[in-house]
Image (cartoon, rainbow, N blue to C red):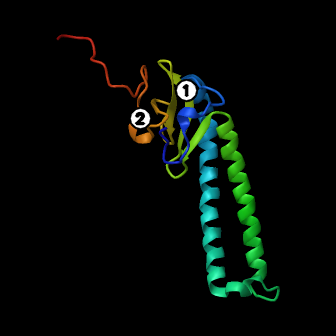
Amino acid sequence: METERDGVDHAATVPPRLWTVEEANARLNELRALLPQLKAWATRLGVVHEELQRLASFWGKELESNDNPDFALRHRLDEEWQSLSRRLEQEVLRLHEDGIEVKDLEVGLADFYGRLEGEVVFLCWRRGEEEVGFWHPLQGGYRNRRPLPNSRKAAPRPRGGSA
């Protein structure tokens, strides 16, 4: 069975729901607000991780000692890590349960499970795009995205006039 880079066999996955393009477009305002927040949390997680690594590298096992000058900092960073991780996972899971896959926080890429010509596909949206105008197979990924039929992103049609 084919799997995407994330190791999930999307072909065997039963999506929680299938979105129409109109329904997906109606959800974009929420995603426009939420994705930057998720990205900020992920960025902060990276900073917290680096700081925890720095402390561990500098102090070694001494970091666990109650009298260590950075003991309180380490525990504060651990709590922040756990809180941010939990919030990020909850939001991504909530979206997933709604049939929305967050693919890339850096570029703001999200896919909605949908149906096109009888096949379950991903309706693809990227931050900065006005609407959901692309799709790709579940196994295909972003590099295989194509304009939706009847989308403004589809190839321009010849205008009327002389031939």
Note whether residue 131 is visible: no
Which of the two discs, 2 and 1, labels the residue nearer the N terminus? 1
Quarter of the view holding residue 94 = top right
Q: Secondary structure at mark 2?
A: loop
10 Å crowding of disc 1: few (<14), some (14-19), many (20+) = many
Q: CA distance from mark 2 to mark 1?
A: 14 Å
In this view, the residue farthest toward the left is: 163
Note whether residue 34 is visible: yes
Q: Position of residue 142 (x, y in %)?
A: 44, 40
Question: Viewer-proximal residue, 42 or 152?
Answer: 42
Quarter of the view holding residue 13 = top right
- Three-letter code for the amino acid on which mark 1 is drawn: Gly
Residue ID at (43%, 37%): 140
Residue designated by label 1: 114
Residue designated by label 2: 145
Residue ID at (32%, 23%): 156
Q: Position of residue 162 (x, y in %)?
A: 18, 10
